[in-house]
Image (cartoon, grey):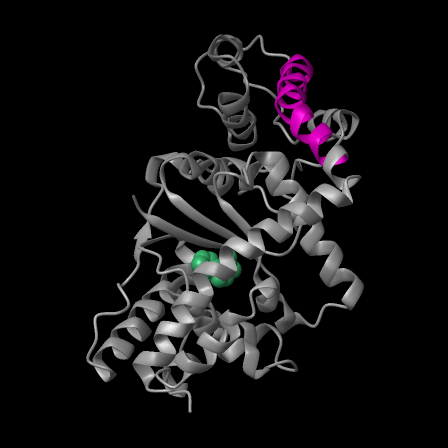
Amino acid sequence: MERVVSGIRSTGNLHLGNYFGAIRNFVRMQNDHECFFFIADYHSLTTHPTPNDLHSNVRQVLVEYLAAGIDPEKATLFVQSDVPEVAELTLLLSMNAYVGELERTSSFKEKVRKNPNNVNAGLLTYPVLMAADILIHRATKVPVGKDQEQHLEMCRKYARRFNGLYKTEYFKEPEPFNFGQDLLKIPGLDGTGKMGKSEGNGLFLADSPKQIRKKVMKAVTDSGPTEPNSPVTEPVQNLFTIMDVVSEPGTLQFFQQEYANCTIRYGDLKKQLAEDIVQFVEPIYNRIQELSADSDYLQKIARMGAEKAHESAAKTVKEVREIIGFKKF
Ligand code: TRP
């Protein structure tokens, strides 16, 4: 059984792209792996959120992941800052992290380019905190998208250096967990590109049926096929792609055939698509409403997660302190 650790960015508003990307795979993984999923609120401090935003973002993420199917009885779901041991491990690992290589990290360089007025040390050491997140639970696998590959490589390097310095095999180098084919790419409703949070082209798990219908009816299409069997244009293909994941197979085939015959009516396509998306999202949407109103339950879940994560983290930090040579008088 693999030990899996994954950090979740602490900004809410998950969309269908997130769902059919990582989240659905997390939900599957929790059944046959020992999973630690945490809301990365320490990491989020690099952007200086207000105290109110910080907490409400974390709460929203917790609600949405639970609603999407993370089962706190199966996976350890916790808030990063509830387990402050990770801050100590970050300090200890930072002694093996060289400033030059941190400065050369692509994510850091990008942040510097985008926000030249907020180049804080937390941004620079972001990969060290991330390495601590992973190593503190002795993860063997980390689900990573393209943008996090370099960070995982750095984590492996810090594990290696620690082992080398102290002549130990304490840390195993965690491997990337690649979802491969299972990572579906969901396009947006604006005719081109991926669904995103800030692109204004997204369908969110927290969208009501009414909002979903409205957004789908406004989705970009084209002026319609004029010749039989003409190639499907990108905006229409995007709607077909979404249909492929939410609708019955026959539904997609029907509209593809109508397109090929030049008899397709986009209004009908959108109506059907909207209903199928609503059917998919509505149970999650309802669950989000229930959970949002249930502070007691959220508290219980967060405390339970913190306790489980603390146990695993405290053990690692204790062992690492011994390896390093800290001794009690
Ligand atoms: N950096 C990750 C992201 O932006 C989030 C993250 C923090 C993470 N710590 C982690 C992911 C540890 C995997 C493992 O998405």
Q: Position of residue 242 (x, y in %)?
A: 54, 27
- Is residue 189 visible in the rendered image? The answer is no
Dominant SS type (magenta): helix
What is the quadrant of the C terminus in the image?
bottom left
Examine the image and state in which quarter residue 226 appears: top right
* Residue positioned 21% across, 80% down in the render: 164
What is the quadrant of the N terminus in the image?
top left
Q: Which residues are magenta?
A: 266-289
Q: Position of residue 10 (x, y in %)?
A: 62, 56
Q: Position of residue 144 (x, y in %)?
A: 40, 53
* Residue positioned 60% across, 68% down in the render: 42
Q: Is residue 156 above or below residue 266?
A: below
Magenta-colored stretch includes residue 28 = no
Judged left or right of residue 229, residue 122 is right
Nearest the eye: 42 or 186: 42
Q: Is residue 312 above or below residue 84?
A: above
Q: Position of residue 171 (x, y in %)?
A: 28, 67
* Residue positioned 45% across, 64% down in the render: 313
- Is residue 328 visible in the rendered image? The answer is yes
Magenta-colored stretch includes residue 281 = yes
Nearest the eye: 77 or 154: 77
